Amino acid sequence: MAELTDSQLQRYARQLLVPQIDLEGQQILKSARVLIVGAGGLGIPMAQYLAGAGVGFIRVADDDRVNLSNLPRQVAYTEADVGRLKVDALAERMKAGNSEVTVDAHAARFDANSASDLLDNVSLVLDATDSLQARQDIDRATHQFELPWIMGSAVRTSGQWAAFDAQRRQGCYHCLISEPFGRQNTSCAELGILGPVVALVSLQQALWAIKYFMQQALPWAKLYVMDAWSGEQARLALSIRPDCPLCQQPKS
């Protein structure tokens, strides 16, 4: 298990006092390796908090560039970053906050062609995209490589998140939505989004990631739905689809 330096013991002093983390948990976080797909409104809070928490290796993948319309919710970026690759700007901020964390920035879109490289040597995947198609790509690839992943999405004032275990024992994202179509595939660019809503979803994902590394049970295949404006929240258990094109089909 990775030993902590004197500097790290001082940095994480408050976190080490948390019974669910303590010294052993902090050592586990130092050895943890995670992929974040997306460096936008969802990706920024989870990336910065996981780096701050001491997750030792964080790979971030996104091929997009900073736009002025991103700034209200993608608060790691400044006006000076407009036009820059998001992963470059975000990696810079993460390293500035914790120079001891390894940040592996990839200016790439997650798809069937890039999946193998992006998933190499990580143990957990966090979805920070705004695309149903991207989430389905993540679901297929993590199923193939037997990796767990945590999805999240937000639009207007609502958000949702769910976790899927490596073996998909309780079902997969394809059991929930098998094909991208209609309004379900409409992004925040068309419907709008309120910045703090995205942050609320992202921080739930980050907390679950830490719980996963602490070997705490996650509510696998349970969809959490939140209306941040009204404060209402619900949890829905997903059902395995007998005809699911992913988890109920033999692997090739």
Image (spheres, rainbow, N blue to C red):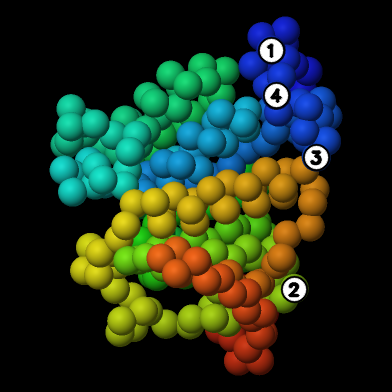
Name the residue that disc number 1 marks.
10
Q: Nearer the viewer, residue 49 or 242?
A: 49
Between tags 3 and 4, which lies in front? 4
Q: Is residue 151 above or below residue 45?
A: below
Secondary structure of the residue carrying tag 1 is helix
Between tags 1 and 4, which lies in front? 4
Between tags 1 and 2, which lies in front? 1
Indicate the amino acid at tag 1.
Gln
Q: How far is the residue under mark 3 from the one under mark 2?
A: 26 Å
Give residue 14's mark: 4
Mark before the other along the chain sequence, 3 or 4: 4
130 sits to left or right of 32: left
Q: Residues within 10 Å of mark 1 (few under 14, many from 20)?
A: few
Give residue 169's mark: 2
Indicate the amino acid at tag 2.
Arg
Give residue 20's mark: 3
Secondary structure of the residue carrying tag 2 is loop
Residue 117 visible in rendering? no
Q: How far is the residue under mark 1 from the one under mark 2?
A: 40 Å
